[in-house]
Amino acid sequence: MAIQSTTFRVGLPNPRKLQLVLWTTSVWRTLDFGLVSSMKMKLAARFYFLVTGAAIILCVGICWLGPNAAAQRKKPRRAPTARSTSTAIDYSHFSHATKKHQAACNTCHKVPTENWKKVRDYPDVADFPGHDACVSCHRAQFFKGAKPTICSDCHTKVSPRDEARFAFRNPGGARQFLIEFPHDKHQDVIARLFRNLRFETQPQFVRAGFSTSHSFADEKTKHYNNCEICHAPRTSPVLPATGWPDAFAPPADTFKLAPLSHASCFNCHWGSQQPVNDNCGGCHKLANQPSVWMDSTSRISLKFRHGREQHTQECTTCHINITKSATLRGLKPDVPITACLECHNKGPVRFDVTNELLAIDKNRDFTCTYCHTSDVGRRDPPASHYLISGLPPKKRKDVK
Ligand code: HEC
Ligand code: HEC
Ligand code: HEC
Ligand code: HEC
Ligand code: HEC
Ligand code: HEC
Ligand code: HEC
Ligand code: HEC
Ligand code: HEC
């Protein structure tokens, strides 16, 4: 039996190997508290005592329970590698980009987590990984001083007696993953679902699904190609860290939301439809650098309001590219200026684009502010703007 040979091959006095044994059973959980609360005392001594004691209990348990224990055995951990002491490394911020943190997602994240019933109305990854995901490599950091820095990755207070944790995900953390959502593949699936089934009678959408959407309470509301099941209006835009450009505060009806949780995915991707719930990497792609918290918004045309009556149309009349695309990467802009032409640059009354282009002819420093804030409006107009205005493209530096 694999578990037994592992157990007895490791020498008892070697705590590093022991931890491998510990990890293999749920004994670790009960031990855990003892470990943590011992930190205020003579750490090492108490620790090794506990570990040895537990190991003995464990060995006895294994011999006794035999196949049961083997069945419960989890995957063995990789060899411990983290350095034991260092001043340079910041242990208060966990990064997925660190090489040794790039093991399969479920070596750390459980699906679903034990707390899901308390915090979600559908099974979800709703809590931090537990201690056993880290201790194998970070024993030194876990038992460093009275207030180990590493605890603050997950806990609000660093205390051996306090298990209070940040909300998961940590609202103060940066977003480390980008989402892969192939809009093209979902167009038909979602359209079909909504065509065939009345919303109220459709079980998998009732609780988990699309709970962000308000528009379905009323069946007569237009569904706009069903985009709004995932992109409801965002009523309270979040101030970007750098502030709004030109201190222009966008009105409340400006933005649409994007999904912030699994609520709009897991009703289809829970069990059978790939990427399934534990294939995290099928949807989450590690970003090159931690991006800003997703709940802020970057725009080319910040002054465009989705909520304006004339702008409230079928989403795909303006978002003509996204529904054909497998990924958002490189898809900027997804709304071409031709979508604005009909109302904003057509005779005899409105020439919002042409007028601003002509203003540059008179003053090369003219800033376009009808659709843009000055970060965009002071740059050279792209060729697309000249094209819809029937003017030859030019650069500001060529204006006399
Ligand atoms: C070595 C353990 C470990 C592994 C492996 C791991 N995670 Fe995490 N993950 C954590 C910890 C710890 C946190 C909480 C700290 C934080 O928010 O950065 C976390 C937080 C997250 C978050 C919320 C924060 C954010 O960046 O938006 C997401 C999403 C996430 N993990 C996805 C994944 C995916 C996808 C994988 C596999 C590709 C993965 N994790 C692998 C430990 C791990
Ligand atoms: C497979 C071994 C391994 C596991 C498992 C592991 N780490 Fe690490 N961790 C490392 C290594 C290696 C480093 C690089 C710095 C060092 O040598 O300590 C590191 C660095 C860190 C850092 C410093 C910032 C960073 O991300 O580079 C934090 C914080 C951290 N780990 C937290 C955790 C937490 C929390 C867990 C459990 C959820 C965890 N680690 C699981 C090996 C591991
Ligand atoms: C990767 C995130 C993470 C880190 C780092 C972490 N904890 Fe925890 N902690 C948890 C989770 C999750 C639980 C809930 C455990 C469970 O129920 O399985 C927990 C539970 C606890 C508890 C309650 C008793 C128990 O063991 O269930 C205490 C006390 C505690 N942690 C203290 C600490 C201290 C002290 C540190 C630093 C040495 C620390 N934790 C580091 C995530 C973490
Ligand atoms: C099942 C959910 C779902 C549906 C339905 C859906 N989307 Fe998306 N959409 C997403 C996700 C997830 C993202 C990626 C957000 C991210 O990058 O984290 C996204 C991104 C976008 C973006 C880019 C947002 C940005 O901040 O750059 C646009 C624009 C968009 N979708 C428009 C649409 C339109 C138009 C439709 C209808 C034809 C639609 N979506 C249908 C889930 C959905
Ligand atoms: C009249 C044209 C138009 C229509 C109709 C339209 N959009 Fe947009 N949408 C835009 C523009 C313009 C942007 C901003 C692009 C930029 O400046 O980067 C945008 C941005 C977005 C974004 C990114 C977040 C944000 O608000 O900046 C999402 C998500 C989105 N639209 C979803 C939708 C959905 C869902 C619908 C249908 C209910 C819809 N849009 C209808 C023009 C339109
Ligand atoms: C209404 C059910 C439904 C919902 C909701 C849904 N999906 Fe899907 N998804 C599917 C189906 C069906 C496919 C397979 C489509 C195909 O291959 O033509 C798919 C395919 C995918 C793929 C591509 C898999 C591959 O192998 O190429 C990704 C990634 C994905 N979905 C992510 C998401 C994300 C992220 C969300 C939530 C924002 C989501 N899906 C919401 C039904 C759904
Ligand atoms: C079907 C696609 C899909 C799969 C599979 C998936 N995620 Fe996500 N996840 C998303 C989307 C979409 C979001 C919302 C956008 C975001 O937060 O980046 C999200 C958000 C999250 C969050 C933040 C949720 C919150 O409520 O704060 C965590 C944590 C997370 N995912 C972890 C994981 C882990 C761990 C796995 C694998 C066990 C996983 N995800 C599998 C699509 C997926
Ligand atoms: C009616 C609204 C509107 C007006 C007026 C307008 N633009 Fe734009 N602009 C857009 C839209 C929509 C896009 C994105 C689509 C595209 O590039 O065709 C855009 C894109 C841009 C971009 C490219 C931004 C990027 O990061 O890709 C620049 C630069 C720009 N405009 C500058 C200008 C300048 C300078 C003027 C004044 C002459 C101007 N715009 C007038 C709507 C407008
Ligand atoms: C169906 C017609 C229509 C389309 C298409 C349209 N708009 Fe508008 N838009 C209007 C009207 C009408 C106004 C109000 C004009 C006024 O009062 O002077 C307006 C006003 C605006 C304003 C001023 C802010 C506000 O809401 O009062 C901006 C900025 C704007 N539109 C940007 C755009 C952009 C960018 C596009 C293309 C992506 C676009 N519009 C497409 C009809 C349209």
Image (cartoon, rainbow, N blue to C red):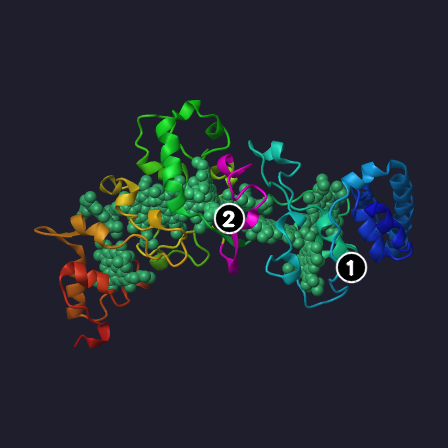
Give residue 59's position: percent from left, percent from top. 90, 44
Q: What mark, if any, has residue 180 been given in the picture? A: none
Whether residue 93 appears in magenta in the rendering, the answer is no
The residue nearer to you, when weighing 193 against 172, is: 193
- Which image quarter is the C terminus in? bottom left
Give residue 293's position: percent from left, percent from top. 49, 52
Mark 2 burial class by Cα count in 10 Å: few <14, some 14-19, many 20+: some
State the residue position of label 2.
Answer: 283
- Which image quarter is the N terminus in? top right
In the picture, measured across the screen, residue 242 lies left or right of residue 315, that is right
Q: Is residue 236 visible?
A: no
What's under tag 1, amino acid-wise? Ala
Give residue 79's position: percent from left, percent from top. 76, 59
The residue nearer to you, when weighing 56 against 159, is: 56
In the picture, measured across the screen, residue 33 lies left or right of residue 257, that is right
The residue nearer to you, when weighing 161 against 202, is: 202
191 in relation to 76, above or below = above
In the picture, measured across the screen, residue 276 lies left or right of residue 189, that is right
State the residue position of label 1.
Answer: 140
* Residue visible at 30% across and 58% down in the picture: 373
Give residue 219's position: percent from left, percent from top. 34, 25
203 in relation to 68, above or below = above
Which residues are drawn in magenta? 267-292
Sequence order check, earlier mark of 1 and 2: 1
- In this view, which residue lies farthest toward the left? 348
Ligand 7 within 8 Å of disc 2? The answer is yes
Q: Is residue 203 visible?
A: yes
Whether residue 268 appears in magenta in the rendering, the answer is yes
